[in-house]
Amino acid sequence: MSYDEYYVKSVVRAIPDWPEPGVIFRDITPIFKDPKALRMVSDAFVQRYMDADITHIACIDARGFLIASIMAYQLQIPLVLVRKKGKLPG
């Protein structure tokens, strides 16, 4: 495991037994409070798709919007936000 991987994993919070017993929920919210971790994660995604033949990035609600917007900006491609029907107007 690289230093970056170790560092990011150390920032992610493990919440046992949520939403039900036996499940360990991985809360990525702390990544957004840690500029170093956020840079590592976003750079890793951008590097992965830098030479890919993609024209858009689609992402789901909440935290997906946060990482995907950084990727779309860095890759200079449009961002498509996917939400449940009726969640917001338009």
Image: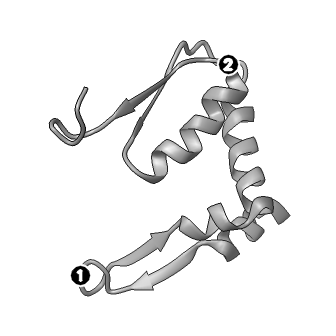
Q: Position of residue 50 (x, y in %)?
A: 72, 24
Say whether marks 2 and 1 touch (CB < 8 Å).
no
The label shown at residue 31 is none
Classify residue 34 by image quadrant.
bottom right
Q: Which residue is mark 1?
A: 20
- Residue type, numbered disc 1: Glu
Residue at the disc numbered 2 = 76
In the rendered image, the vertical position of residue 23 relative to residue 61, given as above or below: below
For badge 2, the amino acid type reads Gln
- Say which of marks 2 and 1 sits in front: 2
Question: Compared with residue 22, is residue 36 higher up or lower down, i.e. above or below?
Answer: above
Residue at 51% x, 18% y: name it: 56
Which of the two labelled residues, at mark 2 and mark 1, occupies the earlier sequence position?
A: 1
Nearer to us in this view, 47 or 38: 38
Picture residue at 61% right of the left edge, 27% below the top = 72
User: Where residue 5 appears, x then y in whole percent?
Assistant: 73, 62
Location of residue 13 by image quarter: bottom right
Distance CA(mark 2)–CA(mark 1)? 40 Å
Mark 1 surroundings within 10 Å by alpha-carbon count, few (fewer than 14), some (14 through 19), many (20 or more)? few
